[in-house]
Amino acid sequence: MVENPCPLCQGSGWVLEVSKEKALAKRCKCYLERQTEVLLEQANIPKRYQACSLKNFEVHNDSYRDALKISKQFVKNYPVQDVGLLFIGPCGVGKTHLAVAIIQEIILKKNIRCAFYDFRELIRDIQSTFTPDSSLSESEVLEPVFASEVLVLDELGAKRTTAWVEETIFYIINQRYNNKKLTILTSNYLDSAEEEDTRQPGFKKGEDSLVDRIGVRLRSRLYEMCKIVEMWGDDYRKKIKQAGYRF
Ligand SMILES: [Zn+2]
């Protein structure tokens, strides 16, 4: 028994909508609200990002403006939206903020199952299932990763690639692609070493590019299934300049 049953449906979750000629059973508002709550809990969004919304995203330059516009469009289009997003940019420009904001809005507005994963944590979770005393199997760990309609994979490439990691991530992302499920990724790594851009001094030059981190095969798959959204940040630029002052 529900303790304080909803006055509209007495806890049944259904209401009758009576129009001119017929009565139609419809889901009660309280049912949808409960469902939204459950979806938000299941989405695995870290506490520090739970307040992130498209409304409270601060625009500091044109790349932020474009990224916000694309994010809003993504939410508006969903589920007709047919490509995911890959946010690329240095630390601190708000890539994760936007990715989280998108899935929270999709849950709130459309009651769709979404999930957030940090790239390193996902790899760690999968690896931990290989130990003999693990309570979870690999398929249990991967269930939400495959079943979520929209998946955020944060900080792609943040862990150095091994053949195993590359294979696993490719498998996951490819599987989602084949099932027409959307993936939103963020990465601090510039796309390729040759394409270093003087406009974006925040990127770590001389260090790995995205392709070094995730491999050629996954990179080309990501290009097929995601719109690339580049962001850069003035704050980061200042920091780099500051670091250059020697005392
Ligand atoms: Zn109700």
Image (spheres, rainbow, N blue to C red):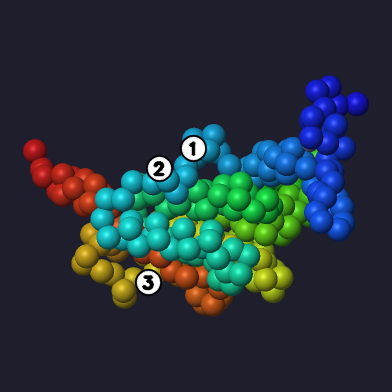
Disc 1 marks a residue whose amino acid type is: Ala
Ligand 1 image position (quadrant): top right
Disc 3 marks a residue whose amino acid type is: Ser
What is the secondary structure assignment of the residue under circle 2? loop
Q: Nearer the viewer, residue 137 or 37?
A: 37
Q: Give the percent coordinates (x, y) of residue 18.
A: 82, 50
Tell me the distance, in whole angstroms, between the alpha carbons under discs 1 and 2: 9 Å
Disc 2 marks a residue whose amino acid type is: Asn
The furthest residue to the top: 3
Q: Nearer the viewer, residue 163 or 101?
A: 101
* Vertical arrangement, residue 184 with respect to residue 12, above or below: below
The residue shown at (47%, 45%) is 53
Q: Give the percent coordinates (x, y) of residue 111.
A: 68, 51
**Residue 51's disc number:** 1
Q: Describe residue 202's horizontal placement relative to residue 166 as left or right.
A: left
The first of marks 2 and 3 along the sequence is 2
Tell me the distance, in whole angstroms, between the alpha carbons under discs 3 and 1: 33 Å
Disc 1 + disc 2, Cβ < 8 Å = yes
Tell me the distance, in whole angstroms, between the alpha carbons under discs 2 and 3: 32 Å
The first of marks 3 and 1 along the sequence is 1
**Residue 56's disc number:** 2
The first of marks 1 and 2 along the sequence is 1
Q: Give the percent coordinates (x, y) of residue 242.
A: 16, 44
Q: Is residue 142 visible?
A: no
The furthest residue to the front: 20
How would you rate the neighbour count of disc 1 (Cα within 10 Å): few for under 14, some for 14-19, many for 20 or more? some
How would you rate the neighbour count of disc 3 (Cα within 10 Å): few for under 14, some for 14-19, many for 20 or more? few
**Residue 192's disc number:** 3
